[in-house]
Image (cartoon, rainbow, N blue to C red):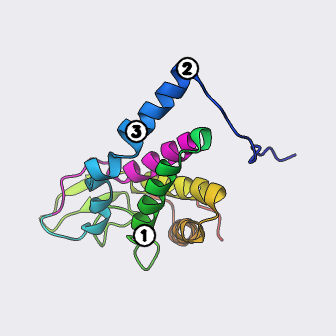
Amino acid sequence: MKLERARSTRYSFEGVLADYLRAVSDQWLKPAPDANPGMLEMFADRDRRPYRDLMAWAGEFAGKYLTGAVQVLRLTGDSALRQRLERFVQDLVALQDADGYLGPWPQGSHLTNKAVYPDGRVFWNWDSWGHYHIMLSLLLWHEDTGDRRALTCARRIGDLLCELYSARASPICTTRAVAK
């Protein structure tokens, strides 16, 4: 038996919880993309030199942001939050490479989980994990909105992961991914 959430469920909160959800939405979720433009810019300028000085998990930020925001949207139905997320998703999917890559690391480092810079430095990162977070968030967004662009973007990431990791041993585990 498959367990699914009740999609038609509507929530109505009052008091402290309603105030908290409103504050999270108004003070964090709605302004975050403008207050932290690097959350998406790192994808746009991944090949620009000099390369950004990123944390290993930098590629996760956009996906984690969208996942949390969709969950709050499910609870609140906040139309202003929904509009903000529509713009965020539109901007995010526009940054996907032709091959499906949607991470912050330069060409030649895509989904190897390490960035190799021209000066020979090697920087281990969590690129695959970042793609997981983006895929999850886009699937949640699509589930609630029917946004086909989000589904197509997530599918292209999944196809790329399967193509890369089923063709050789995974760089993050000792087993092989299941072929598509």
Q: Is residue 157 above or below residue 81?
A: below
Q: Viewer-nearest of labels 1 and 3? A: 3
Mark toward the start of the polypeptide (1 vs 3): 3
Q: Which residue is mark 2?
A: 15
Three-letter amino acid code at the position of disc 2? Gly
Front one among 120 and 62: 62
* Quadrant for the C terminus in the image: bottom right
Q: Is residue 42 visible?
A: yes
Which residue is outermost to the top? 16
Q: CA distance from mark 2 to mark 1?
A: 43 Å
Q: Residue at x 54, y 40 (%)?
A: 72
In the image, residue 169 lies at what x, y percent? 51, 62
User: From what the image shows, is residue 120 above or below residue 78?
Assistant: below
| Secondary element at image label 3 | helix
Asked if one can make out residue 167 in the rendered structure from this viewpoint, the answer is no
Residue 66 part of the magenta-drawn span = yes
Could you tell me residue 114's position as x and y percent? Answer: 32, 58
Which residue bears the numbered disc 1? 101
The answer to whether mark 3 and mark 2 are in CB contact below 8 A is: no
What is the spatial separation of the Cα atoms under label 1 and label 3, in whole angstroms? 31 Å
Q: What is the quadrant of residue 101 in the picture?
A: bottom left
| Element on which disc 2 rests | helix
Q: Residue furthest bottom?
A: 98
Q: Within 10 Å of the Cα at label 3, are there few (<14), some (14-19), or many (20+) other Cα atoms?
A: some
> From which residue to which does the magenta span run?
51-73
Amino acid type at image mark 1: Tyr
Given contact means CB atoms under 8 Å apart, are the residues at marks 1 and 3 in contact?
no
Mark 3 lies on residue: 26
Instruction: Indicate which disc, 3 or 2, sits on the residue closer to the N terminus.
Output: 2
- Residue, x 54% and y 47% (percent of image)? 70
Our reading of the magenta stretch's main secondary structure is helix
Residue 152 found in image quarter: bottom right
